Amino acid sequence: MGERHLLDILKNGTCWTSYTRHFRPPFGANPKLSNAEQRYILTVYSYGCNLGPGPTARLTSDIATAEALRRMC
């Protein structure tokens, strides 16, 4: 079996199950975030790996800030 990266697994899981639909605003409103699904996946990754928003934001500074990741959970 080949090497797999956790973010790729989360991205594929999103495609298969659409679990990020639970992170969207209620009542079918469109999210006002740029790259909303990408940020949702990063939030799951950061809290799932027990990193938290600060270290994840430092690693992915071009995608989301620590404050944005903190507000998504």
Image (tube, helix red, strand yellow):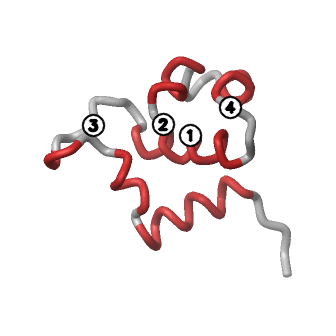
Local SS, label 4: loop
For marks 3 and 4, give the CA distance: 22 Å
Q: Are marks 2 and 1 in contact (CB under 8 Å)?
A: yes
| Mark before the other along the chain sequence, 3 or 1 | 3
Please indicate whether residue 23 sits to the left or right of residue 15 in the image. left
The residue carrying mark 2 is: 73
Where's residue 16, x and y in %? 46, 73
The residue carrying mark 3 is: 31
The residue carrying mark 1 is: 43
Where's residue 69, x and y in %? 53, 28
The residue carrying mark 4 is: 52
For marks 1 and 4, give the CA distance: 8 Å
Which residue shows up at 46% across the image and 66% down it? 15
| Mark before the other along the chain sequence, 4 or 2 | 4
27 w.r.t. 2: above or below: above
The amino acid marked with disc number 4 is Gly
